[in-house]
Amino acid sequence: MDNYGWLSILPSVIAIVLALKTKQVYIALLFGIWFSWVIMNDWNFLTGTLATIEGMVNVFKSPGNTRTIMFSALVGALLLFIQYSRGVEGFINQLNKVIAYFEKKQKGYSRVVVQLLALVTGILLFVETSISSLTVGTLYRPVFDKLKIPREKLAYIADSSSAPSSILIPFNAWGAFIMGLLVTQGLDNPFALMLSSIGYNFYPILAIAIVIIVILFKKDIGPMAKAEKRTRETGELLNKNSKPMLSSEITSLPPKEGIKAKAYNMIIPLATMVFMMPVNLIYTGWDAVKKSTSFSDHLFQAIGQGSGSSSVLYAVLTAILVAMVMYRSQKMMKTKEMINLTLKGISELMPLALLMLLAFAIGDACNQMGTGEFVANWSKDWLSVEFLPAIIFIISSFIAFSTGTSWGTFAIMMAIAIPMAEVHQAPITLVIAATLGGGIFGDHCSPISDTSIISSMASASDHIDHVNTQLPYALIGGVITTILYVILGFLI
């Protein structure tokens, strides 16, 4: 891997600026990928263009990337199943009863209750960010629409409850990945270190707290305030020129006629997907764990060694099969009908799969250019120990923002932040927390983040509108976090 200096930053910055200015995410990402490969091929446009094509093909050389893209497409089939079976309608009927109860207590309070329920649901699904965002968006979109809550608000709640909860409750693939990074740095007792760093991981805590404040006190700001005003006054759930990430076939497919709406036709398939995630983590990681450990330790270590991408893919496939068996046993769908529905759901989410492909491709290009390493190494010589946690948080944020990946940021920064903490004798738990929090913050702000993309998709929101409305809240949390790290840098 070469290091192209400041040039390594340009493609990501250009892609992000283009995405925000033009709202054409596909074109912006494609241009960023192309520009990266042109730079790496000595500004030869022909070889750079051919390398761009090969770079996108090479995305599929990574089994993890391929599984994630497959998951993104298969999710469409599951969404169509639970909607066509009237499972979503049944769940909404039950939720409407809850809304009616609170509406009797106090008029307008139901909007607050539903938003809080969506937030709690996202936090409880800490096992995996994609499942969290997907479930919150799918379950609550019809109810949010009925109560005239803008789609941008749903995407914000889904996004801000997924990654923050996964990093704060690390009994999942996130925790496993972080422990693995700590082990590679030669640290003893990585699990205890990871747990002790949670109290200093301010950004995820603030991200969730800000959502709660926004919901309870109705303190919307910036573009989100405009979105709320638009929805209240006109009933429009999206801006006029917005393009929802989810196809209208997914969001407005009429349910099958002649069958009763039952909530469990939605709850059971989605619960299956959530339950199968840790089961698959244990299955995929079981053989990688030393046999000398006790059963409980073996179980937890297996979750730590499991494959997150495999587990997500197996989970959604299992959920689809369970749904098929349920609907066939109830004689509501024939086998041919279910197969056609599956293919239709996959085809409708091809745009999302393409977007994931482009996001992975620009991440690979950034990696080959040494974007993250350049930014991290550039800062080594001038860091002061008092400002170390704050600067590490800012650098991690910038890397995550530029590359759209928090995990990639963790992998890059842990190898630099921990040795720096040891050299400067800075509190190791504070530095670990700053690295992790910065990755989450930058990922939240980035329009090329896969977590944000899935949140937009599940909520059927325009992706750039979601990024723009979420950004002010994320920046508030980021600024407060930076100030807290500066204060602690002088106190500890």
Image (tube, rainbow, N blue to C red):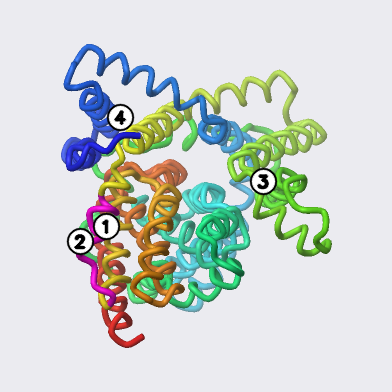
Looking at the picture, which amino acid does disc 4 mark?
Tyr
179 left or right of 468 in image: right
Q: Residues within 10 Å of mark 4 (few under 14, many from 20)?
A: some
Looking at the picture, which amino acid does disc 2 mark?
Gly
x%, y% of residue 152? 34, 52
Q: Earlier in the sequence, mark 4 or mark 3?
A: 4
Alpha carbons under labels 1 and 3: distance apart = 30 Å
Q: Earlier in the sequence, mark 1 or mark 3?
A: 3
Alpha carbons under labels 4 and 3: distance apart = 29 Å
Instruction: Say whether marks 2 and 4 touch (CB < 8 Å).
Output: no
Instruction: Say whether marks 1 and 2 touch (CB < 8 Å).
Output: yes
Decide: is 363 above or below 162.
Answer: above
Q: Earlier in the sequence, mark 4 or mark 1?
A: 4
x%, y% of residue 330? 80, 36
Quarter in which the C terminus is drawn: bottom left
Q: Which mark is residue 471?
A: 1
Residue that badge 4 annotates: 26
Residue plotted at (39% across, 75% down):
216
The part of the chain drawn in magenta is 375-385
Residue that badge 2 annotates: 222
Residue plotted at (83% across, 61% down):
295
